[in-house]
Amino acid sequence: MTLLTESDPSPFEVVNPDAAAPVVFVSDHNANAVPAALEGLGLPEGELGRHIGYDIGIDRVARRLAERFAAPLVVSGYSRLVCDVNRVPYSPASIPEISDGTPIPANQDLQDADKQARYDALFHPYHGAVADLLDRRMAAGDRPLFVALHSFTPTLVSAPADRPWEIGFLWDEDAATSALAMRIFRSLFPDACVGDNQPYSGATPEGYSIPVHAERRGLKNLCLEFRQDLIAEPAGGALWADRFGDALAELLRTGGKG
């Protein structure tokens, strides 16, 4: 089964593919596109524009950072509801049947062949692009810092408590790099509300990109979460990209490469 047609977007985009910066960015939940064959996943109008469909505002942040650091950036091309490229294939959250209280009609009771078609069309090409980029860099003797960029909603329907953090640093095996990055960020922006493994922990087993692409290669890494209401508009996106960029520049200056 071939899921994508010539009229569908690419499953990934690589910005600055040949750049030799000391950092590589990825954005797993960058877009909210749905293959035409899946007819919007059967969702009501507007649902794909909510946080369940993609990481609101992160595309602007990611591209601004890639431009500032003249660094490679790999972005996904489709909604996390079609196939979440930051989840292990065939795990429950990989192709969710429900997301923050919203049922996803086209994801109900899928056969393995239907899931595999989505992985073949979207998941494997995206991760192949990330792996190829990192392998080329490492073959040339480089060990770039791997930075995964995400955004989070200030409130969840399923857990309505406020999420006050403005920026979160998620970590698991590479606690040291996140600790240094947080210390730098707080020194530059002492009034910011910084989440240390918030709004959730980087040690949870759901994530895919950091463990597979960074930890298995022994690369230092960061996983960032920006609060969506702060970056949804251009001015806010630029502000928070620049704030994190200032901290990242200092981190790289003090030896934050892999």
Image: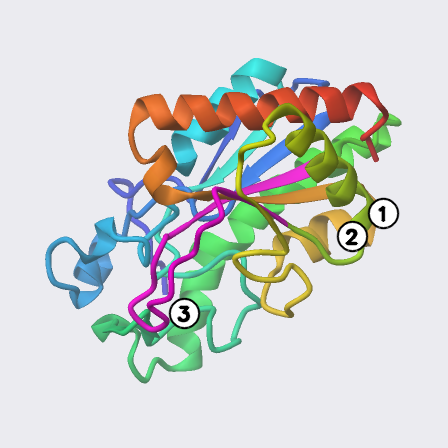
Residue topped by disc 3: 95
Q: Which of marks 3 and 2 is in front?
A: 2
Q: Are marks 2 and 1 in contact (CB under 8 Å)?
A: yes
Closer to the camera in the image, 82 or 236: 236
Image point 54% across, 57% down: which residue?
86
| Residue 158 magenta | yes
- Provide the residue designation for mark 2: 215
Render colour scheme: rainbow
Of labels 3 and 2, earlier in sequence is: 3
Mark identifier at residue 218: 1
Which of the labelled discs sits on residue 199, or is there none?
A: none
Percent across and percent down for residue 128 are 61, 46
Gap in Å between the C-alphas at discs 1 and 3?
Answer: 29 Å
At label 2, the amino acid type is Glu
Q: Which residue is drawn at 44% across and 51% down?
A: 164
What is the CA distance from the residue labelled 3 to the residue labelled 2? 24 Å
Q: How crowded is mark 3: few (under 14 residues within 10 Å), some or many (20 or more)?
A: many
